[in-house]
Image (cartoon, rainbow, N blue to C red):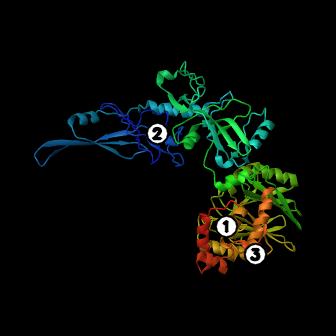
Amino acid sequence: MSYCQLRPAPPGQSDIPRGFPDCERAQARLRDPLTIENPLVQRKELEREEKFSPATPSDCKLLLSEDHSTVKVGEPKYFTTSDRRKGQRCEVKLYDEMESSFAMICWDNESILLAQSWVPRETETPEANILLNFIRGNKETNPQDDAIDSYLEESINLNTIVDVYTVKQLKVKALKNEGKDDPFYGILYAYISTLNIDGETTKVVRNRCSSCGYIVNEASSICTTCNKDSSKFKSVFLSFDMLIDLTDHTGTLHSCSLTGNVAEETLGCTVFLSDRARGRLRISVISCKLADPVEASLAQLGLLHHTDLRKSLTVEQDAMKVELLPALTDNYMYLIIDDDTKEAAIVDPVQPQKVVEMAKKHGVKLTTVLTTHHHWDHAGGNEKLVKLEPGLKVYGGDDRIGALTHKVTHLSTLQVGSLHVKCLSTPCHTSGHICYFVSKPGSSEPSAVFTGDTLFVAGCGKFFEGTADEMYRALIEVLGRLPPDTRVYCGHEYTINNLKFARHVEPSNTAIQEKLAWAKEKYSIGEPTVPSTIAEEFTYNPFMRVREKTVQQHAGETDPVTTMRAIRKEKDSFKVPRD
């Protein structure tokens, strides 16, 4: 006998994957080889390593076992109840790689005889077979026409989409890309201005083939993609397919496709897949969420840029250059160049291709990767970069860093050409966080420190894996003791929001007010607000000023460490003013 155990989904999730009809209510007859009580579904982000764990078109996944269980039927046991009635019971156990012991108790002679007749056989789960074929079909399907459904697009890693556009900018870029097959992706701060669900020409609910996921011809019930007659094996499921208009302060995008799980999240009801809208500019919404008010207002003011508009910057000093490379939405990568030897190191190369191109532009040999910590937006490009540039030495202080070749600790040293690099352990944001202090021996020019997510301009990183004591040590006792003119190159462009919080903590601090006005001007023209210096940070960074009475009074504390803890907690929930 075979079986698969089927359990309910977690709270808030549907018990039934779409395309797996009526499985919640399905129950086998007495002599059927299998009873299905509830589908075994889990949230997709929970990673399991079962042999078969096929994806589903919903937020849930169905876990199946292809192995067949074995049966062990015990000897019947006879008993007499307290009221002198005689009875019998028999324990039946089922085993497979998912359940070490799945016990059933038979109480009557008929069921005991039935259990004793059981032999292992193949599980009969037609719905599961349909679902599995659907998944396999998706992997094998290579659509030839240009109507690529959004369920394929849902496999895109949204974290890699970083460019922010207005409607006007999207239209301009679409005209430039006309004739190209590859789509481009971006973030748009807009609202749904038209949602047509009852027009005569609008067909909101569509039939889709469970085998391949494409729309079924309603007149013939034939799937034109896999040529299956859906009426014969009931492989059709309903899905929603709608067009919306998206509007921002620069214009409107008409007939955008809103489908799949994106439509479910947006509208709060069960909807599914769709073709792209027919027209010169084809828009498919691949994620739709309530925007952060601050980000939305910055976007409308033109202060959020796609990476083409964020300018790089070269800081030259003596025999060392630092090229600031904007990445993702607000990250920075740093190309450190030794002019004497034409060797270079890259700090946190999250966009490897951009790094390779910049190294070629400067005519330098990239030899070293300095990774501040393991988070994807800093270390996520390491593995690709070492494939593009074989032989790179990858340094970091955490085994979780991809492609790591040299693990470093506090005060470890290394060379990039003639440049001296000292590693500074600053655990708190992550337990293995390293800052890199780079200097030129014998030079009178300021040195540089690359601080990742430990120290920002006017701020510090969240305490994900550490404590206020550790951040105090990192900022005050380690970084704070570097030469005052040391240039600080941090991992993100957070300066404006950080300074607004600093102004909240110390409203009378003129250094904060002046730096904020300067940062707004820089940011408005797409220029970076880094580097700062260690000396400057002590004048306007509240986390570097926890020993100051004004900061302690704001926090209601008298100790620097408890002040650090208090203002970090306050910053975590701080609502940034829109000014």
User: Hey, what amino acid is under mark 2?
Assistant: Leu
Query: Depth-wise, is mark 2 or mark 3 nearer the camera?
Result: 3
Badges 3 and 1: C-beta atoms under 8 Å apart? no
Position of residue 122 relative to residue 165, above or below, is above
Quadrant housing residue 337: bottom right
Q: Residues within 10 Å of mark 3 (few under 14, many from 20)?
A: some
Residue closest to the eye, 388 or 297:
297
Sequence-earlier tag: 1 or 2: 2
User: Hey, what amino acid is under mark 3?
Assistant: Leu
Q: Secondary structure at mark 2?
A: loop
Position of residue 210 relative to residue 509, above or below, is above
Sequence-earlier tag: 2 or 3: 2
Task: Tell me the residue that label 3 is attached to.
Answer: 482
Residue closest to the eye, 59 or 573:
573
* Residue 490 appears left or right of 23: right
Q: Position of residue 428 (x, y in %)?
A: 62, 68
Position of residue 170 relative to residue 315, above or below, is above
Q: Is residue 434 visible?
A: no
Task: Tell me the residue that label 2 is attached to.
Answer: 64
Query: Depth-wise, is mark 1 or mark 2 nearer the camera?
Result: 1
Q: Position of residue 297 (x, y in %)?
A: 69, 54
Q: Which residue lies at the image location 69% right of the left edge and 70% below the top edge? A: 503
Q: Which residue lies at the image location 61% right of the left edge and 71% below the top edge? A: 567
Q: Give the alpha-carbon distance from disc 3 to disc 1, as whole Å.
A: 25 Å
Q: Secondary structure at mark 1?
A: helix
Task: Tell me the residue that label 1 is attached to.
Answer: 501
Q: Is residue 238 visible?
A: yes
Q: Position of residue 67 (x, y in %)?
A: 44, 38
Quarter of the image that includes the N terminus: top left
User: Hey, what amino acid is under mark 1?
Assistant: Phe
Q: Secondary structure at mark 3?
A: loop
Q: Give the alpha-carbon distance from disc 2 to disc 3, as whole Å.
A: 58 Å
